[in-house]
């Protein structure tokens, strides 16, 4: 009985916390001809695979941009090219592959984006190539999550483009 009360209480706190979160805009990520990308297509059959890689990149773009958008805004990102930090090491026999990262192998993205309001009014649009040749210099490079360099590159881009507009 005590466990049931604890679970109910935790559930109520979780619900209250999610209800209090600020509303965010929506983000749609589309991958245009992913078979032609510089990377993320798993050429050496190592790593997590192209579908999982693109799913994670979709999640990272959404996480980076959606909190910075107004609730009535919609961002559409057409990813045109992906080049992940490092290069795959086909000789490494690890379950999820091994990427060798050096300062000569920075992450890079090329994409188009359009930000509109719910009334269809265009707020911002553009085509960009993102890269950070100094990606190994900061403490952020020590992160142990998936795609830490790409995550930071996308966060920086989203902050530059969308933060402080509201």
Image (cartoon, grey):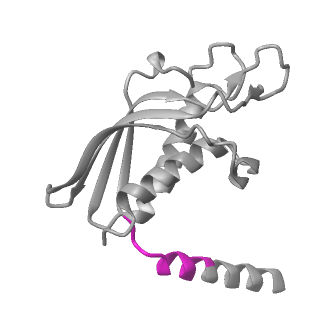
Asked whether 155 falls inside the magenta stretch, the response is no
Magenta-drawn stretch, dominant element (helix, strand or loop): helix
Q: Residue at x 56, y 79 (%)?
A: 17
Quarter-wise, where is residue 73 in the image? bottom left
Q: Read off the magenta span.
A: 14-24
How many numbered marks does the figure carry? 0
Tell me: 124 left or right of 151.
left
Rendered location of residue 118, percent (x, y): 20, 60
Asked whether 20 falls inside the magenta stretch, the response is yes
Quarter-wise, where is residue 106 in the image? top right
Residue 80 sits above or below residue 27 on the image: above
Q: Residue at x 54, y 38 (%)?
A: 55
Rendered location of residue 8, percent (x, y): 68, 82
Front-most of residues 126 and 5: 126
Return the residue found at the far right: 93
Front-most of residues 62 and 162: 162
Rendered location of residue 27, percent (x, y): 37, 51
Tell me: 120 left or right of 108.
left
Tell me: 44 left or right of 113.
right
Image quadrant for the N terminus?
bottom right
Image quadrant for the C terminus?
bottom left
**Is any atom of residue 61 visible in this view?**
yes
Q: Residue at x 69, y 85 (%)?
A: 9
Residue 69 sits above or below residue 129 on the image: below
Rendered location of residue 82, percent (x, y): 50, 29
**Is any atom of residue 65 visible in this view?**
no
Q: Residue at x 21, y 60 (%)?
A: 117
């Amino acid at each position: 009985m005590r466990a049931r009360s604890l679970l109910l209480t935790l559930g109520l706190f979780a619900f209250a916390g999610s209800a209090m979160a600020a509303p965010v805009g929506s983000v749609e990520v589309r991958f245009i001809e992913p078979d032609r990308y510089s990377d993320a297509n798993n050429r050496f059959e190592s790593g997590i695979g192209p579908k999982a890689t693109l799913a994670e990149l979709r999640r990272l773009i959404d996480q980076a941009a959606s909190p910075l958008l107004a609730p009535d805004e919609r961002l559409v990102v057409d990813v045109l090219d992906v080049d992940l930090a490092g290069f795959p090491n086909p000789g490494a026999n690890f379950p999820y592959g091994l990427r060798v990262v050096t300062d000569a192998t920075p992450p890079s993205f090329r994409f188009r984006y359009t930000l509109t309001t719910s009334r269809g009014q265009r707020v911002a649009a553009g085509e960009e190539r993102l890269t950070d040749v100094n990606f190994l210099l900061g403490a952020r490079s020590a992160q142990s999550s998936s795609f830490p360099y790409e995550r930071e590159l996308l966060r920086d881009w989203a902050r530059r483009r969308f933060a402080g507009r509201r």
